[in-house]
Each structure stands twice: as C-alpha cells, then as structure tokens.
Image: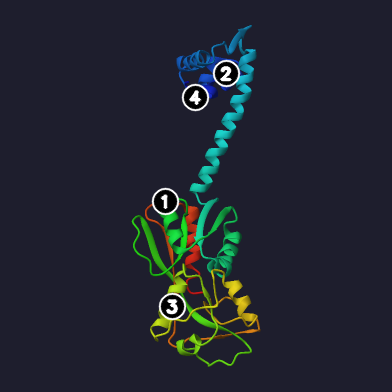
C-alpha cells in the first residue's frame, strides 16, 4: 500500500484554508500544476473526491474535511518530532544511557547528576548497574552510551577507553578491633574477611594484593554491594578492602579506615563508542571528566 506524502497533505490544508488552488500554490511556492497533481494523487490514493468547487471557491468534501483534520494533527506531530530531535542534536535535551558498578553509582555519579540537573536539566540519564565486562559488551552493541569501568581492560574494537580516576583501596575495620596504623596482607589475612564478589575487578585486585605476600585467605562472605559490606563491618562481622573516594562521607563511627602497606589503588576509566558523539552524551562526558580529580 502506498504511503500518503506529508507534502500532499500540506497542499490539501493550504487549499482548504485559502479556498483556491492558485492562492495555495503561491503560499507554498509551488507551480499551480504541481498543486493540482498533489490533489489528484491524494484522491487517487483515497479513492474519493476531497474537494468541491462552489460559487468560485474550493471547499473540502465531507471526506476531505475528515482528512484535513487528521492531516493537521499529523503535520503538527511531525513538526514536534523534528523539533524534539533538533533539541537533542543541539544537546539541549536527550537521553544518555550509562552503565557502572554500584559503588560508582552510589558515590561518584550523584555529584555528576547534580551538576547536570543545574546546567542541563532536560538530559535524561538512564543508569544500569553492570560489571565492567557487561558495560563494555553493551557499549559495543549500542545499548549504552557511556560506561564507567575498572582498569585495565583489553582493547575493544570501536570503543574508546580512557583513564578517569584513581582512588586508594583502604582497609575498613570494626572500630573495636586493635589494628595497626597501616594494614598489611599478613595481618589482614588472619582476620575474618568480607570481600567483593569474585566476578568483580576489585576482587581480583585484592586477591593479587594478598598473593604477592603469599596469602590466599578465604572470606566469610562475598558481596557485590559496598554499602552492605560496610554495614557488616560496622556490625563487627569482619574487615573489608574497599576503594575510598575523597568526596565520600566518613564511614560509620563503628568503622575505622586504615591505609594499606603496600598501597593499593582502584583505577577507573570512561568508555564510549569511537566516532560521532551526540551533544547530550558529550555534556555528560564533560561533567564526568571534571570529577577525575575530585
């Protein structure tokens, strides 16, 4: 079935509003034969007359009136759609899909979201809680726009992965424990431990930290939610190794933080597709880059 052209509908509306083929042609900057052809094509497509001439003036038929009413709505919707898309092209509004871990979403992204709310309130940020591997996979297949991932990561065709920030990994220890000023693998390996889920980059990072000193401790429990880990530490269930962002609030008074010896760092990167970047996505990237030293 042939589609109805919006240009033909625009011609029908112009004739109806002006009551004349000639006046409609002038208003649309079309040759009169072109206006007549538009109406002939519409009537052929509909299978019924759309206009009638009475006393020298052109008026819509009953079927024509129905089509004119629908055509006005269609054209208004089309104009609105183009306006909405243009606003997204200009970066005034848009939708940005971002993937990150729970820790990043809890402590780093709220700062970026607050800045965006103040300066770009029409940009809709859709968050997905994902591992770094899941984030890169979804970036590659086009279902995410930005990813915050643990580093290092292997190269992925079509993606840019840039270092973003480095935060120290600290020992989170129940406050009633007696612990050294700097926590070593030897001391911590002898304590009950609450560690990150084995699927996370942080789990591999801390396992390597223990392994360099010849230790391979078995945790009491493994989780992938840092706030839950901190709650268990506060309850005295065990100690944990977690990154500490400089802007993160001081933990529960039932928890003490201690630096590690040797020091350990959690490195994060920003990933996005190579090539053209929509302006709304670029706005989000700019705000995130400003957090790299926060």
Q: CA distance from mark 3 to mark 1?
A: 31 Å
Q: Disc 3 on helix, strand or loop?
A: helix
Q: Residue at x 58, y 93 (%)?
A: 178
Residue 63 sits in quarter: top right
Q: Earlier in the sequence, mark 1 or mark 4?
A: 4
Q: Disc 2 on helix, strand or loop?
A: helix
Task: Note whether residue 249 is visible.
Answer: no
Q: Residue at x 53, y 21 (%)?
A: 11
Residue at the disc numbered 3: 207
Q: Along the line of sight, which residue is nearer the eye, 39 or 111?
A: 111
Q: CA distance from mark 2 to mark 3?
A: 77 Å
Residues at badges 2 and 3 in contact (C-beta under 8 Å)? no
Q: Along the line of sight, which residue is nearer the eye, 33 or 243?
A: 243
Q: Earlier in the sequence, mark 2 or mark 3?
A: 2
Which mark lies nearer to you, 1 or 4? 1
Which mark lies nearer to you, 4 or 3? 3
Q: CA distance from mark 1 to mark 2?
A: 48 Å
Q: Disc 1 on helix, strand or loop?
A: loop
Q: Position of residue 147 (x, y in %)?
A: 46, 60
Which mark lies nearer to you, 4 or 2? 4
Which mark lies nearer to you, 3 or 1? 3
Residue at the disc numbered 2: 15
Q: Position of residue 20 (x, y in %)?
A: 57, 15
What numbered label is drawn on residue 141? Answer: 1
Q: CA distance from mark 4 to mark 3?
A: 64 Å
Q: Along the line of sight, which residue is nearer the eye, 256 or 221?
A: 221
What numbered label is drawn on residue 5? Answer: 4
């Amino acid at each position: 079935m042939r589609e109805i052209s919006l240009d033909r509908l625009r011609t029908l509306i112009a004739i109806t509003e002006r009551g004349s083929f000639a006046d409609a042609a002038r208003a649309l900057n079309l040759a009169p034969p072109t206006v007549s052809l538009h109406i002939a094509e519409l009537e052929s497509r509909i299978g019924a007359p759309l206009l009638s001439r009475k006393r020298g003036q052109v008026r819509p038929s009953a079927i024509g009136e129905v089509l004119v009413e629908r055509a006005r709505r269609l054209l208004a919707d089309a104009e609105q759609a183009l306006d909405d898309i243009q606003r997204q092209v200009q970066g005034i509004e848009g939708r940005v899909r971002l993937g990150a871990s729970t820790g990043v979403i809890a402590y780093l992204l709220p700062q970026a979201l607050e800045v965006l709310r103040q300066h770009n309130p029409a940009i809709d940020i859709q968050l997905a809680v994902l591992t770094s591997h899941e984030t890169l996979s979804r970036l590659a297949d086009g279902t995410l726009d930005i990813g915050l991932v643990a580093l290092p990561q292997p190269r992925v065709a079509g993606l840019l992965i840039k270092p973003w920030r480095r935060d120290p990994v600290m020992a989170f220890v129940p406050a009633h424990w007696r612990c050294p000023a700097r926590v070593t693998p030897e001391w911590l390996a002898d304590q009950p431990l609450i560690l990150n889920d084995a699927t996370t980059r942080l789990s591999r990072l801390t396992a390597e930290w223990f392994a360099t000193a010849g230790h391979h401790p078995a945790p009491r429990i493994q989780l992938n939610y840092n706030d839950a880990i901190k709650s268990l530490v506060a309850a005295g269930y065990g100690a944990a190794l977690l990154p500490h962002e400089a802007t993160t609030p001081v933990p529960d008074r039932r928890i003490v933080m201690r630096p590690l010896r040797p020091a350990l760092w959690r490195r994060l990167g920003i990933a996005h597709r190579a090539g053209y970047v929509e302006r709304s996505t670029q706005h989000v990237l700019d705000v995130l880059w400003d957090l790299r030293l926060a």
